[in-house]
């Protein structure tokens, strides 16, 4: 047992921190978030070309760096901290993970090397009912219909809340056989986004640092070789993809919680009121102490979940814990990030309420990430089911 | 202790409701439920016309004494007016700073000349006011005011220099009441003056502050040799603190009930959505909606206590008034979060690009200012502890 | 509309405050709470003889003072504040209210004058299932069975969590017809506690300032004239009795929340640490400010609910609001009292944890009162049903 | 970063589990799950015999270095030992202050003579220790210590006068380590000494403090010319603060994992009851149980980080250790409330008159001390803000 970063992991983390502090500045975020694409292509090319981050956990056999989920989490933490506007999360944590978990050997050989070269990808699985009841992110959110037609499949339906869905070049799509519900009948497909039968619409979002899209499938006709995993029986694979994505999302949130704390503490040391820095007021100190407590607890949750995710990918003895560890991390980190971002805004006072300061970017990202893949309440209820039912 | 209204008051209620029903239509139909917090920048012109329509009906300044042109309504009638106004979905009042703050201050502390000069424009809904209190870096701390007022003997005018911030409606306003330091040597609460300043002059520049919502309800106001007539100081130089403190009292009047009806409209919208999208079946959401409803109801009861002059258990302080800002601001902030959580992931999707927010989205973001302006929650807690509980004051540098 | 105490109401409140500050001292509470009876009979006799509090809202026709629910709430606030150990709540807020709401004219004439003379009473309606699911306090908690036998009724069953159930002289008992459930089949009876067929056992409780009992009915045979209200159809009356009791309980809680605040503030001004009174630390000031906020909000909720209760008794226009107002008051006051008592303990530090200081008495009363007639969650769910279902 | 244990460690785990299974029976059967917080006064004598049983098996002081008589276990093995110990329901250790605090302090700062004199009794489970830190009115503020130690040249001994408070296990203890002021003119952190004092002497009186639970785990200890041999001061007069601060570090060791297993036992009991009485179907309770489970799991991960020496994001401070007390104490307090709320009204009924509490009732009341002793939550937040975030220190009187 060694529950600390290895030297190599620490180096990956430090490199990410240094690079992102330099490139993902307040100005860079703002200019990226105002574009429809949502990121600066030059920066993404630099990441893919110079740093090779997009290949971090893709096996060496497919041209990747062959590292694991822990290294990925270390990097995501810094991306969440610096609000990097990029298709990294969608491409790596959704697209590449989906291919690695559910792709056929042929699909992996076809697409993983291209992702290593900079191809962007995402996962589209939720219909509009994902918004029902405060948020549904399980098998019941899969609504698109896939009908078999000889050797082909015909897909119809509307997919919503798809991260980077308007810009991704490769789509992993979940759909179900007509008449099925719940975990039954679900299939996964991989398809180039520009295929006929796919219409994509950018959804303008409150959090501008990560784009969402609606994707309408109209008689999208797919050959048999686009099918990932077992026809009509892909829920276990989709579930695992979602659990990995959930851990990844939590890692970003933890980084955001850290940055919210850092911004607040820094501001409080500069800002004077009643003749002294507000950092000296106990009300501010104690709020900051609670923020730091949440951040460190979130960090422990994420590191653990990342270790479990690695075991789940590698088939280690803790693989069966992935669902629980992911829900624990996402439940805690969702609440911690939003609470920290809100507290940071409050500590900033009036200026925290302006567009100019960065703290609102975190408040918005916190809420958006809370509602992607399930809120704290949602994941606590999942934990409750494991414990009580 | 009695909750019901008299038959006369109930008749008054019908009168208000009827008038609103009859007049809030045609060109004003589009104003329904608009212009609230986070929406204050919308329909500014149309809402000023609405202000004048109200004045025609005698529905501005209903609580002002008759001798100053008001309707002289009793507390009960004011309560009823605000309730019906909000129930009808009548728009946020662009005249509320004049009616609720500037006017009452001028009535209480102003000269007869000031009353004659300023009250009619407020009553008629033709002249709008804004408030020049906060300054950059000073937060809610009036004692830190740095804006200076120097009396120019030659011109016979006060000359103002400095900067105010978080001034809402500054672009639309005709006048601003400004706290400025008349004695340049003074510190803290001493040496302040309270000025009535025309916004239509070259010495004043207004710049919008882009907020978290992308919009600019709040402004910075720059005073660069702005002028103010000698007779437009309220009270004497040095009385500024006293006048400002008196004005604070006016903020906790019957208008809180109107504010609550706006809150109720927001909560109703949340309940409607929850029923529609199934969030009403989510047990955690149910608890939160019930909590919001519970506390909003109690907020109303608390205002009724404030208005009835019910004192605290020791019979001396109006404790229910002391806690009011902290309570409603915190409640409203939670309501914003609840709205988003009821909407779930849909809460993140805007009405339109580039950044057009829905009413609830705008409310959610805007309420973040509620716990900050007019004394942050932290300042409120200091005040409650010190004034309400007699705990030691925060140390102040000498 | 006048939402403030009248002069007379203020006088009643002040008299109660002065008297209780004098008689319900820390020593008096402790000596009363250690007895099985749970109160000092001399003090109860003094209250009944000199002050006539037990008759406060009984109509003058039955020998009472003919005041209302607002005066009652003003008095209960002070009793909760000073933790008066007495059978007042059970006798007046359960027993007398039950007779006034559901008693026949003959029963009122028989018992109300005796209550005015000092007879103690209580209401027994919950079976052991009241403890299920975190607490059940509605019609489904009624478990005892009443069977008709000619002109008589035979009652069997176990009643639990009965306030002052071991000492009360008169019992109001709820039972249901065999085979019924929910709101159907419920009847109310009034019976002297010493009747054969009634066995009573004191339940030792964490909060020693209010006693509870278990009452076992074994073939308790009751004549027809013990029936209160309509046979098998008494739920609306029992519900109203419970709603009035809920308001009364909230009034006590609000008084306790006030006292918890007062004790904490007083202690914080005396206790020095790091060279100054801890009352000067912002962490303590802000905690106290939140306590005061909760207390004043609780006060507004209770006064309003008391006004509604008065209208409900008198058939005023707001009578229909009683259920909602009671749930609002109880939900808020339950949480406010417990939170305040806990914060008071924390502000006291080590000594708050001792038996010697009074703050633990409030912590215990707060939890006990929270769990009697339904917790905050329970009443919020009731409010949710009104709003959402 | 790696979660799994080596095959050697897994073998060690079986060894511990087997030994406990074999020995935790007979006269010790009744001790299972007893003697935890709030239950410390129960079976004191039997638990001391259990302590000696452990010593026979070589299971006391497993983390001490071998040269001082310990087992010299690796961190992993200590983790495993504590996990298995709690999993088996083995009782709360009466020797934990000697093993966890006094012993490590004597090993780190004590003289060879002190090590020879005191360590064997701790290792053998025959000599128990208590801690003389807090004083009345001084709270957690060691700088305020008023107990005095004066060196009597004639006797060649230190003479102690003063009072300590919140001393657990004082009645059962053979020794107490005491912070006292050696320089009567000194203030604050200076002029303190760290003494090893026998409890078996006429100059010491122990009085139980009756707690919220009705029981008396905590005591007042009065020193009235109590004596301490010249060689029983650790370090030099004036070193007391340094030694005490070193000792604080030992409090955050592997024993946290054993504590967590006790927490887990408590949570398991709550889950069992919730399933039995239907509270598991109450959605609000479900959320709270899930939250308690979530945070307890993370508490374990956090301890693993502490033990692995994982540093904070800036690479310098062990932030996860700094926040630990605040986190677990607050969590445990909530767990007590959850236990009562799962039980509903039944939570109020005691096991027996006059005041016999069930385990969960006792836990619920006792946890109220968790956020107070060893530095209140408020003090913890000060420490976190100052040491963890570099925010200004609280002003101290000169």
Image: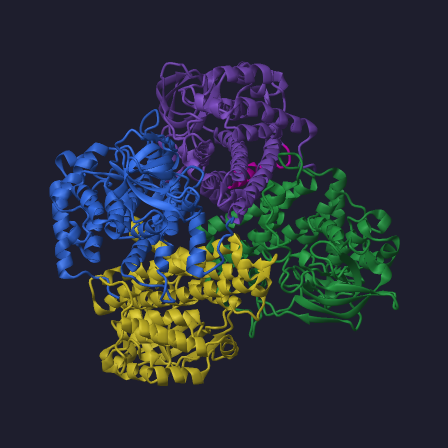
Chain colours: A purple, B blue, C yellow, D green
Q: Is residue D356 left or right of residue A143?
A: right
The picture quadrant where one finds residue B303 is: bottom left
What are the residue bounds of the magenta stretch?
A316-332
Could you tell me residue C189's position as x and y percent?
A: 32, 75
Q: Is residue C171 visible?
A: yes
Query: Which residue is more in the foreground, B345 or B59?
Result: B59
Does B266 sit above or below residue C169?
above
Q: Nearer the viewer, residue C135 or B14?
A: B14
Residue at image position (32%, 82%) is C116
Percent position of residue C236, x then y: 27, 65
Judge whether residue D299 can be spotted in this image. Answer: no
Question: Which residue occupies 66% across, 29% down?
Answer: A10
Relative to C298, D33 lies left or right: right
A311 relative to C92 in the view: left or right: right
The one nearer the camera, C376 or B386, is: B386
Quarter of the figure with residue C10:
bottom left
Instruction: Please state, as top left, top right, bottom left or bottom right, where the N terminus of chain C lies in the image.
Output: bottom left
Front residue of A132 and D127: D127
Give the prevailing secondary structure in the magenta stretch: helix
């Amino acid at each position: 047992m060694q529950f600390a970063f290895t030297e190599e992991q620490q180096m990956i983390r430090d490199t990410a921190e240094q690079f992102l502090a330099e490139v993902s500045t307040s100005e860079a975020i703002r200019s990226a978030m105002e574009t429809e694409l949502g990121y600066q292509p030059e920066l993404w090319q630099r990441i893919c070309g110079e740093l090779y981050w997009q290949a971090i956990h893709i096996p060496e056999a497919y041209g990747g760096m062959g590292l694991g989920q822990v290294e990925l989490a270390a990097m995501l933490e810094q991306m969440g901290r610096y609000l990097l506007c990029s298709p990294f999360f969608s491409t790596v944590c959704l697209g590449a993970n989906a291919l690695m978990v559910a792709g056929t050997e042929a699909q992996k050989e076809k697409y993983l090397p291209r992702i290593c070269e900079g191809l962007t990808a995402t996962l589209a699985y939720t219909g509009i009912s994902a918004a029902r009841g405060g948020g549904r992110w399980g098998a019941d959110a899969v609504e698109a219909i896939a009908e078999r037609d000889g050797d082909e499949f015909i897909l119809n339906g509307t997919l919503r809340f798809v991260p980077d869905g308007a810009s991704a070049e490769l789509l992993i799509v979940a759909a179900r056989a007509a008449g099925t519900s719940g975990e039954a009948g679900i299939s996964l497909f991989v398809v180039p986004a520009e295929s006929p039968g796919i219409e994509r619409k950018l959804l303008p979002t409150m959090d501008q640092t990560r784009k969402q899209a609606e994707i309408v499938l109209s008689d999208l006709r797919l050959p048999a070789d686009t099918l990932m995993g077992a026809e009509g029986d892909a829920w276990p694979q989709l579930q695992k993809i979602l659990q990995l994505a959930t851990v990844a999302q939590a890692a970003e949130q933890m980084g955001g919680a850290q940055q919210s704390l850092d911004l607040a503490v820094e501001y409080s040391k500069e800002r004077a009121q009643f003749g002294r820095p507000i950092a000296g007021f106990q009300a501010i100190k104690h709020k900051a102490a609670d923020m730091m407590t949440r951040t460190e607890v979130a960090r422990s949750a994420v590191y653990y979940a990342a270790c479990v995710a690695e075991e789940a990918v590698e088939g280690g003895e803790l693989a069966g814990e992935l669902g629980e560890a992911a829900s624990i991390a996402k439940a805690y980190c969702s609440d911690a990030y939003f609470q920290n971002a809100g507290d940071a805004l409050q500590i900033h006072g009036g200026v925290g309420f302006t567009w100019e300061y960065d703290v609102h970017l975190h408040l918005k990202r916190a809420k958006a990430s809370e509602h992607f893949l399930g809120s704290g309440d949602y994941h606590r209820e999942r934990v409750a089911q494991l414990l009580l039912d | 202790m009695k909750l019901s209204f008299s038959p006369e008051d109930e008749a008054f209620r019908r009168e208000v409701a009827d008038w609103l029903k009859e007049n809030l239509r045609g060109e004003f139909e589009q104003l329904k439920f608009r212009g609230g917090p986070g929406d204050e920048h919308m329909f500014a012109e149309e809402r000023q016309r609405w202000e004048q329509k109200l004045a025609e009906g005698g529905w501005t300044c209903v609580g002002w004494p008759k001798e100053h042109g008001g309707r002289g309504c009793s507390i009960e009638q004011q309560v009823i007016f605000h309730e019906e106004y909000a129930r009808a979905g009548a728009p946020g009042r662009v005249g509320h700073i004049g009616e609720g703050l500037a006017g009452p201050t001028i009535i209480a502390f102003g000269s007869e000349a000031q009353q004659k000069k300023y009250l009619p424009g407020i009553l008629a809904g033709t002249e709008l006011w804004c408030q020049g209190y906060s300054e950059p870096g000073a937060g809610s701390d009036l004692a830190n005011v740095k804006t200076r007022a120097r009396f120019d003997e030659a011109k016979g005018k006060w000359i103002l220099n400095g900067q105010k911030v978080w001034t809402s409606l500054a672009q639309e306003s005709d006048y601003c009441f400004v706290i400025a330091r008349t004695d340049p040597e003074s510190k803290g609460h001493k040496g302040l003056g309270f000025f009535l300043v025309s916004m239509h002059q070259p010495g004043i520049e207004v710049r919008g502050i882009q907020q978290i919502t992308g919009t600019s309800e709040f402004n910075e106001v720059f005073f660069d040799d702005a002028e103010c007539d000698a007779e437009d100081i309220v009270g004497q130089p040095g009385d500024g603190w006293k006048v400002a403190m008196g004005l604070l009292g006016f903020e906790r009047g019957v208008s809180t009930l109107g504010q609550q009806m706006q809150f109720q409209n927001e909560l109703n919208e949340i309940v409607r959505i929850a029923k529609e999208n199934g969030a009403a079946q989510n047990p955690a959401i149910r608890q939160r909606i019930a909590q919001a409803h519970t506390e909003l109801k109690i907020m109303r009861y608390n205002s009724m206590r404030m208005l009835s002059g019910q004192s605290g258990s020791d019979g001396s302080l109006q404790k229910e008034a002391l806690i009011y800002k902290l309570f409603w601001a915190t409640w409203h902030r939670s309501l914003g979060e609840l709205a988003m959580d009821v909407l779930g992931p849909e809460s993140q999707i805007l009405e339109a690009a580039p950044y057009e927010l829905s009413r609830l989205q705008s409310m959610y973001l805007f309420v973040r200012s509620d716990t900050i302006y007019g004394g942050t929650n932290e300042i409120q807690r200091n005040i409650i502890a010190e004034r309400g509980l007699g705990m030691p004051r925060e140390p102040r540098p000498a």
